Amino acid sequence: MLRACGAGVGPQLLRAALGLGAWPGPERAASGTRGQGWLQPAGHDTGVKVYNSLTRRKDPLIVGSADAASWYSCGPTVYDHAHLGHACSYVRFDIIRRILTRVFGCNIIMVMGITDVDDKIIKRAGEMNVSPASLANLYEENFKQDMAALKVLPPTVYLRVTENIPHIISFIEGIIANGHAYSTAQGNVYFDLRSRGDRYGKLVGAVPSPAAEPVDSDKRHPSDFALWKAAKPREVFWASPWGNGRPGWHIECSTISSLVFGSRLDIHSGGIDLAFPHHENEIAQCEAFHQCRQWGNYFLHSGHLHVKGKEEKMSKSLKNYITVKDFLKTFSPDVFRLFCMRSSYRSAVDYSDGTMLEAKHLLLAAAAFIEDARAYMKGQLVCGPVGEGLLWERLRHTREAVKAALADDFDTPAAVDAVMDLIHRGNGQLQARTKEPSGPRSPAVFGSIVSYIEHFFETVGISLADRQFVPGDGSQAALRSVVEELVRFRLKVRQFALASGKATGEAQRQQRLDRQPLLEACDALRQDLTAHGISIKDRSSTSTWELLGQDHRPGS
Ligand SMILES: [Zn+2]
């Protein structure tokens, strides 16, 4: 694991070594005073306004190119299982990434750094008597599995800290060469905060608190932060021009992002707890290395997941967390995704079983409407004349409302409300059922609404098709055939029980009485099958059925 590096490389050579060709230098115009000197980038206007932590307002999101929007996401520190608080941030940004890609046509290059060496990893590995590398490998794989289970798309590329030590060393050398960092006799390297002047603090406007500094600190100024930490006894280390040691935390993200994107980064994302000091320090490092006025153009921060009633964020240190794996034993990833969409990605959100159940019921309502609309299209559900013009108008209005909401800082709650309102109105039209199948029918408008709603949910990574029958393996197909037979048989029995035939008066009453047990048996079967995730619906002249999603079964 030990790696040496060449010392004494000048900044220009460094840029070449890091593969930092001249990233297209955009024309930049200074924005208003509220932006605190933020430079509006040149490039492709996505049509989205995004809340930018750098300016604390909504700015038009302009990326370098629609074909290659650059996005850096801070990744996990892999020393334990991911919990729902982490998951919430990654799912929220996954939804935003999908919206930017599929609604606004951006091709996104996403880079994520994996922190596979740090204090927590070293400590935990020591406790477990394994090497930090194998502990990190284990939890990195775990993290990737959890993200896949939550349907979070992987980044375009993951980059690990331990595989980029030579680049990190070169990056630190560049910052020293530019006069913004210094090494000490003890083998540490610190960023010289005062050398940044008033440019430090452009994101949060704060300076690291010197209160926690040990007395024997070798820093020039208490607020300076570490770029390279001299090795402590029995710790993993790498060779460097300053002696054996390992990188500080913040430097990894600056190096990894610059390695792929150079001196311009369109979007940087992370949880709000990372804004300070982590992102503030990333900015200081990158702008000192690249000697540019603005490295990252848009900083997006997600709010915390709170544990309801405690007003505290879900975190490992507070020991109030639910692991992703445990959560997924009770609820599906689709339910969690809809839960995430029902609040702004920026806001803190309360976790409770109640809020999760609300999301589940909305999904159920959407799936039930789609099933009814399909039954109507097939002629199985008969209802009175449909206000077709109204529905077409409503669909058009919903499309516009959803796109406008998403363009307004990814306002997913408003978009979900608009779609649920469309479902409500569609349902209203299907409720006016009549016994007589007569009058004009309007299958096209329902087909169009179903298609739109499914597309909406697919765009954000929620599959309503899971409630449809998509035969997977052979046993599933066989089960489907068996249920089909069973429902057909039940329909015959039920129709026989309900038929009056030629009997009248007392004979008819007696006949109904005689056949009542058959009806009761049909009802009992319908009821019992819901326990197995099968829902039968009796229509006017037929019965239809569907598989309930795993999380939609009673008692789950
Ligand atoms: Zn980071």
Image (spheres, helix red, strand yellow):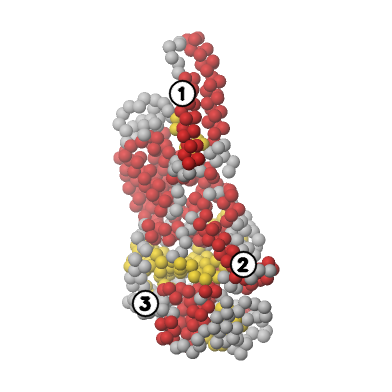
Of the image marks 2 and 3, the number of the one nearer the N terminus: 3
Amino acid found under the numbered disc labelled 2? Leu
Report the quarter where the N terminus lies.
bottom right
- Secondary structure at numbered mark 2: helix
Which of the labelled discs sits on residue 135, or is there none? 2
Of the image marks 2 and 1, the number of the one nearer the N terminus: 2
Which residue lies at the image location 39% right of the left edge and 25% below the top edge? 435
In the rendered image, residue 222, in percent from the top left (x then y), is placed at 60, 83
Q: Is residue 17 visible?
A: yes
Residue labelled with disc 1: 492
Distance Cα–Cα, label 2 vs label 3 = 37 Å
Residue labelled with disc 3: 23
Of the image marks 1 and 3, the number of the one nearer the N terminus: 3
Residue nearest the viewer, comparing 551 with 268: 551
Crowd rating for badge 2 (residues with CA inside 10 Å; few <14, some 14–19, many 20+): many
Report the quarter where the C terminus lies.
top right
- Secondary structure at numbered mark 1: helix
Amino acid found under the numbered disc labelled 3? Trp
Determine whether, in the image, residue 226 is placed left or right of residue 473.
right
Crowd rating for badge 3 (residues with CA inside 10 Å; few <14, some 14–19, many 20+): few
- Secondary structure at numbered mark 3: loop
Which residue lies at the image location 50% right of the left edge and 88% below the top edge? 7
Q: Is residue 33 visible?
A: no
Image depth: mark 2 or mark 3 in front: 2
Q: In this rendering, is residue 193 above or below 158?
A: below
Distance Cα–Cα, label 2 vs label 1 = 61 Å
In the rendered image, residue 428, in percent from the top left (x then y), is placed at 41, 37
Image depth: mark 2 or mark 1 in front: 2
Circle count:
3
Q: Are marks 2 and 1 in contact (CB under 8 Å)?
A: no
Which residue lies at the image location 48% right of the left edge and 77% below the top edge? 255
